[in-house]
DNA sequence: CTGAGCACCTGAGGGC
DNA sequence: TGCCCTCAGGTGCTCA
């Protein structure tokens, strides 16, 4: 489900909900594992701690306390929301109990999500990640260095979290459409100006999506239950057989990097 | 080292 | 209504 804009939207919602720095009273695991087994004892070591901030790094949410970090990845179908005890469903796997009977519930039908404990950001998986797309580190020199020896399509590189974080299958197609570059173009063959264009459009597309509250395809919801609106601004994703809004050409699709990929063969060279 | 393919899991939607 | 198939915002493993 969620790429950077969706995770950022959830993060901002949680920040707001937890802005009074409430105390994490109890971590309740309603099953032992998601994608991985969850470290119950380490997570319980955070009980009694104030949540000082909710942050995002890549597609991870980070609940920060003085004693360590509770980190959460939404996988494909994960969501956090405020929910009462009466409305629990079978895919509600974790409950964070706060003071004032506030309950944050993690729902994840496919269980590709992650809930884990980390002492700090200077351990994996954070040490394996590329720069944030909005950071100065994500610049032409860096990107050229990363891509110069890659024979794989630029779409693969954009989705590689070691190159730059936060871009997944939807935004890779949307970014490359805006940049006017075909997803199957060889990474190492792109010119500096094209790389700069990719950087600019990455930021522009992600920013526009954050403003729209992310994209809701099936089940993405904010912590307050609202849905995202950016899917209404998609130019190519999911639009095979429709016509390009820019030139009228039929949008094409193909499996690239193992996932369905969309582009306009006239607008993208 | 890279890249391709598959595995993990459930639910929605289409075709019959 | 129901069955069977395909597909879905991610990532990490194995194999060539």
Image (tube, coloured by chain):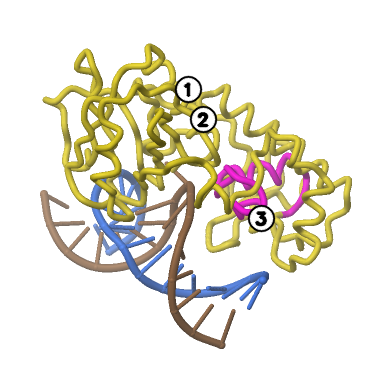
Chain colours: A yellow, B blue, C brown
Find residue C14 and report its image quarter: bottom left
Check if mark 1's residue and mark 3's residue have beta carbons within 8 Å.
no
Residue placed at 70% from the left, 62% from the top?
A: A153
Asked if the residue under mark 2 is in contact with the one under mark 1, i.e. CB atoms within 8 Å, the reply is yes
Q: Secondary structure at mark 3?
A: helix
Which residue was labeled with disc 3? A155
Q: Residue at x 44, y 20 (%)?
A: A15
- Camera-near label (1 vs 3) is 1
Magenta stretch bounds: A158-182
Q: Is residue A260 left or right of residue A176?
A: left
For label 3, the crowd category at 10 Å Cα-Cα, with few meaning under 14, some 14 to 19 and many 20 or more, is many
State the image coordinates of residue A129 (x, y, percent, origin top left): 59, 50
Q: Give the spatial CA distance, label 1 vs label 3.
A: 28 Å
Residue at the spot 49% in from the left edge and 29% down from the top edge: A55
Residue assigned mark 1: A12
Q: Is residue A17 above or below residue A203?
A: above
Question: In the rendered view, would you say A85 is above or below B13?
Answer: above
Q: Residue at x 51, y 49 (%)?
A: A123
- Residue at mark 1: chain: A
Q: Quadrant of residue A80?
A: top left
Q: Nearer the viewer, residue A171 or A124?
A: A124
Crowd around label 1: few <14 · some 14–19 · many ≥20 (10 Å): some
Q: Quadrant of residue A190?
A: bottom right
In this rendering, the label closer to the viewer, 2 or 3: 2
Among the two numbered marks 1 and 3 on one chain, the one whose residue lies closer to the N terminus: 1
Of the two numbered discs 2 and 3 on the same chain, state the one appearing first in sequence: 2
Residue A8: mark:
2
């Amino acid at each position: 489900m969620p790429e950077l804009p969706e995770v950022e939207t959830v993060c901002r919602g949680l920040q707001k909900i937890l802005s009074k720095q409430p105390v994490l009273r109890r971590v309740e695991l309603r099953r032992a594992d998601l994608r991985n087994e969850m470290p119950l004892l380490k997570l319980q070591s955070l009980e009694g701690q104030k949540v000082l901030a909710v942050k995002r790094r890549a597609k991870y949410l980070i609940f920060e306390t003085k004693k360590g970090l509770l980190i959460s990845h939404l996988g494909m179908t994960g969501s956090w929301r405020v929910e009462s005890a009466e409305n629990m469903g079978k895919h509600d796997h974790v409950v964070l109990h706060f003071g004032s009977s506030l309950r944050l519930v993690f729902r994840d039908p496919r269980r590709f999500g992650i809930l884990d404990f980390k002492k700090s950001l200077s351990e994996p998986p954070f040490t394996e990640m590329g720069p944030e797309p909005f950071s100065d580190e994500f610049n032409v020199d860096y990107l050229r260095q990363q891509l110069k020896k890659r024979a794989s399509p630029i779409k693969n590189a954009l989705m590689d979290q070691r190159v730059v974080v936060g871009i997944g299958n939807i935004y890779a197609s949307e970014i490359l459409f805006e940049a006017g570059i075909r997803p199957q173009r060889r990474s190492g063959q792109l010119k500096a100006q094209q790389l700069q264009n990719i950087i600019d459009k990455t930021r522009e597309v992600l920013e526009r999506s954050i403003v729209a509250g992310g994209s809701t395809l099936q089940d993405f919801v904010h912590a307050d239950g609202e849905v995202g609106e950016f899917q209404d601004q998609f130019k190519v994703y999911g639009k095979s057989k429709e016509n390009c809004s820019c030139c009228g050409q039929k949008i094409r699709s193909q499996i690239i990097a193992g996932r369905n990929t969309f582009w306009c063969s006239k607008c993208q060279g």
